[in-house]
C-alpha cells in the first residue's frame, strides 16, 4: 500500500465536520468515492488537484492543499518525482525488459483521473517487476490520454518488449496500442500491421483478451475505409464476443462494435450496441462513460437523430469534470463533428466547446497534444 502523511485523515475530518458522505463529496469534486476512501485511509496519496477541489467544496480555505504540499518527502523507491521518476522507471525497464511475469494487476484504474494515475503507475512499476508488461501498457495509455504521445511511444515499445519476453500478453499489448494509436492519429497503415500481428499472435496462443486484437483490426479497417474487409472483421469480432459475456471486456467490445457500425453507416445498430456498453460500464468510470456517450452521439447523428446526438455530446462534455478531459475523450468528440452536416444547429456550439475544453484542460494534458 502507498503510505501518506496526515492529508488523508485531515480530509476525513473536514468532510465529516460539514456532514458530507464520501459519495456526496465524490460527486462534488468529480472523483470516484472508492478512490476518496482509499485516500482517507492512507492507501493512495491523493493529489494537489484533489486537495484544491476539496478545499473549495468543504470551505476549508487552503488547509487541505497546504497539508498535501507539506507531506513528508518520499524516498525514491516509494514515490519519485513525476518527471524524473518517469524517466528513471523507463531506464530501469529498458535494463530489465523481458523479465516480466504476468499476474493479476492493480485495482480500478478506470476510476482514477489520468493525472493522478500516472505517478502511481510509475511507483508500482518500480515495486512490481513481475508486472512490467501490464504496467508499461497502462503507462503508455495514460501518457497518450494526457497528450504526451512522444513519451507514450517509448512506453509502448517497452510494453511490447516485456510482453514478448513473458510470452503471454503480446497480442493484448499490440491490440491496445493500435486502438490508442487511432486517437493519436497515427498512420492507419502502421496501426493495421500492429492489429494484424495481434490477431496472428492470439490465434497462435488464444487467450481471454481475444476480443481486443479483433476489435483493433475492425476499428483500423474502418478508419481506412476498407468496406469489404470491415464486414468480415465485424462478424469475427461479434463471434468472439459471444464467448466473453462473463468478462469485464464486454463493454469495450460493444464500444468497438458500435464505433465500427457508425463508420459503416449503421447508426441504429450502433446505438443498440452503445446502449449495451453503457449498461455494462460502471458509473465510477467517468472518463470511459464520457467516451461511450460521445460514441453514442456519433451513432445517433449517423442514424439521422442529429439534434439528439449533438445534445448528448454537448452534455457529455459540459458535465465532465476537468480532470477527465483527455485526448481519448476529445477524439470521440471530434468524430461526432466529422458526421454532423455543415451548418447544423449545435455543431458550431460543439466545436467551440471543444476548443474551450482543450484550452481549459491544457494544464493537465500537456504540450504534446494534437487534437485536430
Image (cartoon, rainbow, N blue to C red):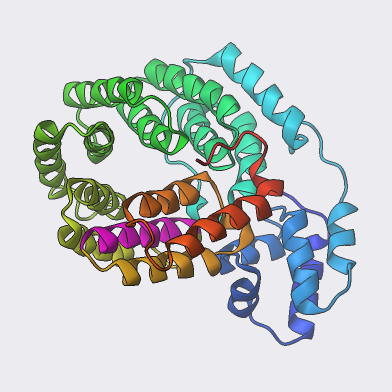
Q: For this view, does 255 lie left or right of residue 1? A: left
Q: What residue do we see at 66% from left, 51% from top?
A: 359
Toward the front, the furthest residue is 343
Name above or below for residue 116 compared with residue 215: below
Q: For this view, does 292 lie left or right of residue 53? A: left
Viewer-proximal residue, 63 or 293? Answer: 293
| Residue 289 in picture, x, y percent from top left | 42, 61
Decide whether the magenta segment is chiefly helix, strand or loop: helix
Viewer-proximal residue, 32 or 193? Answer: 193
| Residue 38 in picture, x, y percent from top left | 63, 61
Residue 178 highlighted magenta (yes or no): no
Q: In which quarter of the image is residue 333?
A: bottom left
Q: What residue do we see at 54% from left, 40% from top?
A: 142
Q: For this view, does 182 lie left or right of residue 210? A: right
Residue 290 highlighted magenta (yes or no): yes
Q: Does any portion of residue 111 appear in the rendered image?
A: no
Name above or below for residue 352 compared with residue 145: below
Toward the top, the furthest residue is 95
| Residue 35 in picture, x, y percent from top left | 60, 61
Q: Does any portion of residue 359 appear in the rendered image?
A: yes
Viewer-proximal residue, 330 or 194? Answer: 330
Q: In which quarter of the image is residue 308?
A: bottom left
Q: What residue do we see at 67% from left, 55% from top?
A: 360
Q: Quadrant of residue 290?
A: bottom left
Q: Give the range drawn in magenta.
A: 287-303
Amino acid at each position: 500500500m502507498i503510505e501518506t502523511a496526515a492529508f488523508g485523515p485531515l480530509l476525513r475530518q473536514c468532510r465529516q465536520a460539514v456532514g458530507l458522505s464520501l459519495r456526496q463529496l465524490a460527486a462534488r469534486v468529480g472523483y470516484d468515492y472508492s478512490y476518496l476512501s482509499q485516500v482517507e485511509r492512507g492507501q493512495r496519496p491523493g493529489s494537489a488537484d484533489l486537495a484544491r477541489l476539496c478545499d473549495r467544496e468543504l470551505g476549508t480555505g487552503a488547509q487541505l492543499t497546504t497539508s498535501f504540499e507539506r507531506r513528508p518527502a518520499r524516498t525514491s523507491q516509494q514515490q519519485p518525482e513525476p518527471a524524473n521518476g518517469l524517466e528513471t522507471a523507463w531506464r530501469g525497464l529498458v535494463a530489465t525488459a523481458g523479465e516480466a511475469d504476468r499476474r493479476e494487476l492493480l485495482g480500478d484504474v478506470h476510476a482514477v483521473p489520468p493525472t493522478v494515475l500516472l505517478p502511481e503507475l510509475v511507483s508500482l512499476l518500480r515495486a512490481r517487476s513481475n508486472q512490467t508488461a501490464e504496467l508499461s501498457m497502462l503507462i503508455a495509455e495514460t501518457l497518450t490520454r494526457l497528450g504526451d504521445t512522444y513519451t507514450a511511444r517509448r512506453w509502448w515499445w517497452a510494453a511490447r518488449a516485456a510482453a514478448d519476453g513473458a510470452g503471454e500478453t503480446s497480442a493484448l499489448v499490440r491490440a491496445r496500442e493500435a486502438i490508442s494509436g487511432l486517437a493519436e492519429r497515427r498512420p492507419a497503415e502502421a496501426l493495421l500491421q500492429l492489429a494484424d500481428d495481434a490477431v496472428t499472435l492470439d490465434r497462435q496462443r488464444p487467450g481471454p483478451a481475444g476480443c481486443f486484437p479483433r476489435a483493433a483490426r475492425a476499428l483500423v479497417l474502418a478508419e481506412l475505409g476498407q468496406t469489404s474487409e470491415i464486414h468480415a472483421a465485424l462478424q469475427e469480432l461479434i463471434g468472439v464476443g459471444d464467448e466473453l459475456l462473463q468478462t469485464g471486456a464486454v463493454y469495450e467490445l460493444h464500444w468497438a462494435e458500435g464505433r465500427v457500425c457508425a463508420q459503416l453507416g449503421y447508426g441504429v445498430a450502433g446505438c443498440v450496441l452503445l446502449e449495451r456498453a453503457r449498461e455494462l460500464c460502471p458509473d465510477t468510470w467517468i472518463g470511459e462513460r464520457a467516451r461511450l456517450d460521445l460514441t453514442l452521439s456519433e451513432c445517433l447523428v449517423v442514424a439521422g437523430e442529429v439534434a439528439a446526438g449533438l445534445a448528448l455530446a454537448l452534455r457529455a462534455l459540459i458535465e465532465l469534470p476537468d480532470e477527465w478531459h483527455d485526448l481519448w475523450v476529445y477524439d470521440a468528440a471530434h468524430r461526432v463533428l466529422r458526421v454532423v452536416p455543415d451548418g447544423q444547429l449545435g455543431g458550431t456550439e460543439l466545436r467551440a466547446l471543444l476548443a474551450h475544453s482543450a484550452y481549459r484542460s491544457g494544464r493537465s494534458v500537456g504540450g504534446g497534444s494534437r487534437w485536430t
